[in-house]
Image: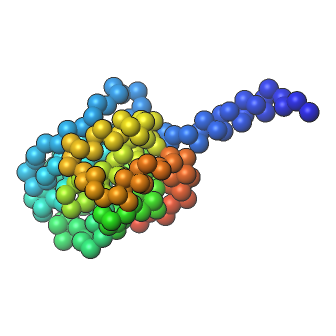
């Protein structure tokens, strides 16, 4: 039996919807590779897109600066560090997605993508200790899964933020990155974002 044209079109539309998550920055100029800049209290900082920012662990002053710059949500990828004390009194949303620099946590990547693509949470600032490795993997995943970049292009951005290529498990994760698999996990990901009083 020959498939009908409407069935083929439906399949094509369904498949294309699985390829990339809708990009809240779509229609804006295609972003160039981000470059780190120093802002008060936040090293290795960059605005990746209008709604996604990255950097190293902010100081309390850095958290206040990010709030003043318009950040709504802080995403912390550090395993053994909480940002709650530095966020008190700022009224920012906070998600702690503990990861180590020893390997990539695909569940945390999926959770980050879910937060980063939620218009009500943007701008989102994501960080680890140095803003290099765990943050680099999260941003590369965003570039590929959400913005449709090639992994090759996303990886060209990593050295600008002092990504450590000796972290073989992170390199392997990027080698084997499957945007469709991660986007599927993202759709079902449970995220715990709290308002820090």
Does residue 94 appear anywhere in the picture?
A: no
Q: Nearer the viewer, residue 84 or 35?
A: 35
| Display colour scheme | rainbow
Q: Residue 101's spot in the image, x, y percent?
A: 30, 63
Height in image: 96 above or below 137? below
Q: How many marks?
A: 0
- Which of the 4 image quarters holds residue 17? top right
The outermost residue toward the left is 40
Residue 82 appears anywhere in the view:
yes
Give 42 or 132, whichever is nearer the viewer: 132
User: Looking at the image, is 81 positioned above or below residue 158?
Assistant: below
Quadrant where the N terminus sits is: top right
Where's residue 164, x and y in %?
25, 54
Q: Residue at x 35, y 40 (%)?
A: 154
Q: Tell me the residue at 36%/45% (across/down).
A: 140
In the rendered image, the quadrant that contains the C terminus is bottom left
Q: Residue at x 78, y 33 (%)?
A: 7
Question: Farthest residue in the bottom direction?
Answer: 80
Q: Position of residue 186 (x, y in %)?
A: 50, 54
Q: Residue at x 25, y 60 (%)?
A: 128
Return the x and y of residue 125 as percentages of the image width and height. Answer: 27, 52
Q: Quadrant of residue 46?
A: top left
């Amino acid at each position: 039996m020959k498939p009908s044209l409407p069935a083929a079109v439906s399949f094509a539309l369904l498949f294309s919807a699985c390829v990339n998550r809708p990009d809240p920055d779509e229609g804006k100029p295609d972003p160039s590779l981000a470059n780190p800049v120093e802002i008060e209290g936040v090293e290795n900082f960059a605005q990746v897109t209008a709604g996604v920012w990255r950097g190293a662990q902010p100081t309390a002053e850095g958290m206040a600066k990010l709030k003043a710059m318009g950040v709504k949500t802080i995403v912390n990828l550090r395993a053994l560090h909480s940002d709650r004390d530095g966020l008190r009194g700022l009224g920012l949303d906070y998600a702690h997605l503990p990861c180590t620099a020893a390997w990539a946590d695909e569940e945390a990547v999926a959770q980050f993508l879910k937060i980063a693509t939620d218009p009500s949470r943007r701008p989102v600032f994501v960080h680890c200790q140095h803003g290099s490795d765990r943050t680099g993997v999260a941003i590369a995943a965003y570039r590929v899964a959400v913005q449709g970049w090639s992994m090759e292009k996303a990886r060209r951005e990593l050295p600008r933020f002092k990504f450590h290529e000796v972290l073989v498990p992170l390199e392997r994760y990027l080698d084997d990155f499957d945007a469709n698999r991660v986007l599927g996990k993202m759709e079902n990901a449970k995220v715990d974002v709290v308002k820090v009083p």
